[in-house]
Image (cartoon, rainbow, N blue to C red):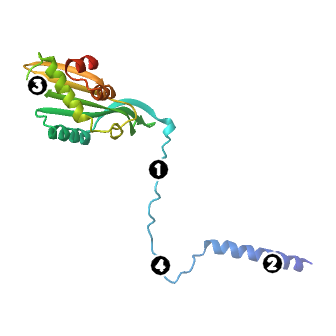
Amino acid sequence: MKRLLLVFFLILLLPGCKTWISLWAPTPTSFPTPVTSQPPTPEPTPTFDPMLCIYVEDFRPLPDLSSDLLDLFDLAGFRDIDVWAEAYGQICLDQDKEPRDFLPRQTNIRIALSIASLEDLTQVGNTLADLLETFESVPQDELPGPDIGLMTITFYAGGSEMQFSFPIDLGRRAYGQGLTGENLLDVLR
């Protein structure tokens, strides 16, 4: 009986020893395994949630539109004129206060030109009508933003200046009604 127990015990013990020995024994290979470098795992790019925007009002210059308008006024015969177009809108800032997007609300146009005299209001109004006539060829839907912007026209003469600032659509309507001279100035003041 002791023999039977000893045989039974060895049968159970030997497979366990084989497993124990195989853990420490090196795995035979026929050639060395080359070391391969794995490309680094790219970090996932954080997704941006537009619902978390912080909106800040800002103005952005529109150099292409400014250049196009300057060419348009130059073709119409205006010399010694400066034209600036800028978009007014909101910048979307993300959680890190980095700008993500600019959302234009309206386009503002600023024009500055020299004229002979600021004393002759009829001539000032007629020059303003000529500017509006030239600007009439620019469709409103080509200007960035859904809202109607402002037009600011500054006349310079003899060290003095006269400035008119009005909504673009008011200038278009006044020109469309045929107003010129002092009548146009009265509407746009």
Q: Secondary structure at mark 3?
A: loop
Q: Residue at x 46, y 36 (%)?
A: 95
Q: Secondary structure at mark 1?
A: loop
Q: Which residue is mark 2?
A: 11
Q: Is residue 151 above or below residue 1?
A: above
Q: Earlier in the sequence, mark 2 or mark 1?
A: 2
Q: Residue at x 27, y 35 (%)?
A: 136
| Position of residue 48 in the picture relative to residue 189 (left or right) | right
Q: Quadrant of the N terminus?
A: bottom right
Q: Is residue 169 above or below residue 69?
A: above
Q: Residues within 10 Å of mark 1 (few under 14, many from 20)?
A: few
Q: Earlier in the sequence, mark 3 or mark 2?
A: 2
Q: Which residue is mark 3?
A: 115
Query: 80 or 61: nearer the eye?
Result: 80
Do the numbered discs 3 and 2 sit on residues whose CB atoms are within 8 Å?
Answer: no
Residue 184 on image: x %, y % = 24, 21
Q: Which residue is mark 1?
A: 45
Q: Earlier in the sequence, mark 4 or mark 2?
A: 2
Query: 91 or 135: nearer the eye?
Result: 135
Q: Secondary structure at mark 2?
A: helix
Instruction: Please state which of the two labelled residues, at mark 1 or mark 3, is closer to the viewer.
Output: 3
Instruction: Please state which of the two labelled residues, at mark 4 or mark 2, is closer to the viewer.
Output: 4
Q: Secondary structure at mark 4?
A: loop
Q: CA distance from mark 4 to mark 3?
A: 89 Å
What's the amino acid at mark 1? Answer: Thr
Q: Which residue is mark 4?
A: 32
What's the amino acid at mark 4? Answer: Pro
